[in-house]
Image (cartoon, grey):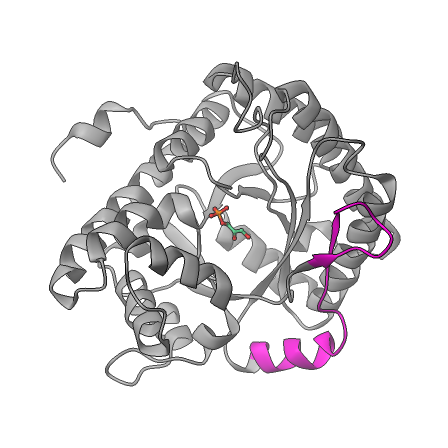
Amino acid sequence: MGTELHETAKALVAEGKGILAADESDGTIKKRFDSIGVESTEDNRRAYRELLFTTEGAEEYISGVILFDETIRQSSADGTPFPKVLESRGIIPGIKVDKGAKPLALANGETVTEGLDGLRERLEDYYELGARFTKWRATYSIGDGRPSEYCVWTNAHALARYAALSQESGLVPIVEPEVLMDGGHTIEESSKASGRVLQAVYTELHDQRLDLYGTLLKPNMVLSGYDASDRAGVDEVAEATLDVLSRHVPAAVPGIVFLSGGQTDEDATVHLNAMNARGPHPWELSFSYGRALQAPALKAWGGDPANVEDAQKAFYRRAKFNGAARTGSYAPEMETAAA
Ligand code: 13P
């Protein structure tokens, strides 16, 4: 089992490749569809995901796709189940298994991620459906004494319980502790909160017997809050993020796959590129972007089947640019070159 987990984890961070997060829950995909004026019906969700999964050439830059429970059970128009569509192109199917961040009892507006009850049985089902990796997202906010130690440790414990169950089922866990960048905090505050969170996560992963070589980490980048008046630039973000990761993430972890977390698609690419340009690092530094890979494609599609090809082109471009950022070879001029 160890070897299979190690191989899957390594394949997900293969050179020049990263992960597409297409695991938006019903509520989140509705928000995305609202932004383009499209109704969130099961068939529209299916059609949109099919567009992404069948983009020609995407497999050059996409190693794996994170699916949602509904999506892993859906099929392309010709009746091929989505996990098979992905596998046939050498893309590894994965699955979001948490049930969302819920209010943490007796805490001041903080959350704990739920979904552990019955998880072992759900994981067996997902493995049968073709998934080879999983994702669980915990969230933390900054400000007014947050994140509290209570929130930090409760989520770290749950993340490790989820991760241990995943490994037992032959699935690589992507451990996602996301420190949210909403608010006016400084990059130093972001750095402190992110470091605290990661330290607790790796303490719990160790105590709960995780084989780190068969895991991936999906963290936030260390940024100034989105409402901060004087936001840190690219070099500062790259250096602060690398500093936090070096202090708190063991070298046994094969890869770090960042979330984009509301950065513009170009910022997410530029930041990843700047970090890789400062390599080599003990871990692969890659992406597991949702919005930053999908935003231009979603807009180009607009719910109209006639726009599928344009949307696929837009998705392919972002995949390619982020693929380049994996080796520090992205240049902003690539954005203006012909599609
Ligand atoms: P974003 O890249 O849009 O933050 O989404 C990644 C993700 O999977 C969040 O859980």
Q: Is residue 243 above or below residue 198?
A: above
- Does 120 lie within the magenta span? yes
Q: Nearer the viewer, residue 301 or 124?
A: 301
Residue 320, x across and y down, in percent: 29, 42
Q: Quadrant of residue 74?
A: bottom left
The magenta-colored residue range is: 102-127
Q: Which residue lies at the image location 36% right of the left edge and 69% below the top edge?
A: 40
Q: Quadrant of residue 166?
A: bottom right
State whether residue 11 is above or below residue 49: above
144 or 99: which is nearer to us? 144
Residue shown at 39% from the left, 70% from the top: 87
Name the side, left or right, on which 307 lies relative to 11.
left
The answer to whether residue 259 is magenta is no
Q: How many marks?
A: 0
Residue 189 visible in the picture: yes
Residue 336 position within the rendered picture, expressed as x and y whole percent measured from the top left: 17, 29
Residue drawn at the location 29% of the way across and 78% of the way down: 76
Q: Nearer the viewer, residue 335 or 59?
A: 335
Quarter of the figure with residue 185: top right
Q: Which quarter of the image is occupied by the N terminus?
A: bottom right
Image quarter in which the C terminus is found: top left
Residue at (15, 30) in percent of width and height:
337
Residue extending furthest toward the bottom: 79
The answer to whether 164 appears left or right of 240 in the picture is right
Q: Is residue 25 visible?
A: no
Residue 290 in the image: x percent, y percent? Answer: 44, 50
Give the image location of residue 327, x and y in percent: 41, 31
